[in-house]
Amino acid sequence: MFPHIWCPGCGDGIVMKSLLRAIDRVGLQKDEICMVSGIGCSSRLTGYVDFNTLHTTHGRPLAFATGVKLAKPSLNVIVITGDGDALAIGGNHFIHAARRNIDLTVLLFNNATYGMTGGQLAPTTPTGKVATTARQGSIDPPFDACKLAIAAGASYVARGTSYHSQQLDRLIEGGIKHKGFALIEILENCNTYYGRPNKISLLELLQWEKDNTVNVKAAERMTPEQLQGKIITGVLHQADRPEYVALYEEHIARVRAKATAAA
């Protein structure tokens, strides 16, 4: 085990293993990948892998990743981001990267808190749960990152958990293979800064992931009453849309041809 900052029981290591397995299954070589991360516990992942990596500023990994992809379209650009990094300070970048449908694979680690900085209220903290900035419980409704991505224009949207690691392998693999903006939201546990303040043990957090999630195929056979309080996992949305880098290159070619003809 190499040195890392993740607490014992953290879901980040499980997600990293799923990511590496997915990359291996796709058959990508190290020099075909660039991983970009922001700020947060999950974003430290880029320091633990042997790829081309960028550890960027808070909320900005999608902006940096967009630049990388436009500069070198042949790279498979994978973004590692957290719920606070992507949906709070980085929310604007998230919406517009999805709108453009640029070919990025985005792993959004959702632990419902700000784990690195002490357990502050996050955009995904469930209503009623305690945080260091919501001592009596949050009154805010949490974001649904997948619905937000679909509404903004993402062409591949999936949700998995750190408990269901084999399913997560497949979801990440599908995101890497997809041509366009691919979001994989990953529900995971933070037993230190989410579990402890809410008096939930690590075992209970993992059990919650197991008991309160339903695969999308099973959900299709369930009634609204049966789905009450459940979170649907699997591929939630997949569509063919023009990809941004391809459109950008076509646009450049047209402009150059027009300039050449005018000369």
Image: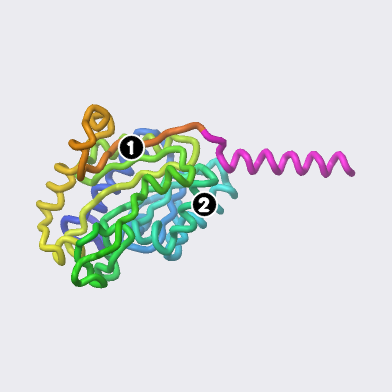
Q: Is residue 255 magenta?
A: yes
Q: Earlier in the sequence, mark 2 or mark 1?
A: 2
**Stretch in magenta:** 241-263
10 Å crowding of disc 1: few (<14), some (14-19), many (20+): many
In this view of the protein, which residue sits in the foreground, 113 or 262?
113
Calculate the distance from the C-alpha at mark 2 to the C-alpha at mark 1: 22 Å
Looking at this view, name the residue that lies furthest to the right. Answer: 263
**Which quadrant holds residue 156?**
top left
Report the mark closest to the observer, 2 or 1. 2
* Image coordinates for residue 76, horizontal then vertical, percent: 48, 42
245 and 122: which is toward the camera: 122
Amino acid type for the residue under numbered disc 2: His
Q: Quadrant of the image for the C terminus?
A: top right
Colour convention of the picture: rainbow
Residue to which mark 1 is pinned: 171
Residue 111 shown left or right of residue 152 in the figure: left
Tell me if residue 39 comes above or below residue 68 in the rendering. below
The mark found on residue 96 in the picture is 2
Q: Residue at x 56, y 53 (%)?
A: 67
Q: Where is residue 38 shown, x and y percent of the image?
A: 41, 60
Mark 2 surroundings: few (<14), some (14-19) or many (≥20) residues within 10 A: some
Q: Residue 251 lies in what quarter of the image?
A: top right
Residue under the image location 20 percent in, 62 percent down: 129
Q: x, y percentage for residue 173?
A: 36, 36
What residue appears at the point 34 percent right and 54 percent down from the top-left corner? 143
Dot 2 falls on a residue whose secondary structure is helix
Which image quadrant for residue 123? bottom left
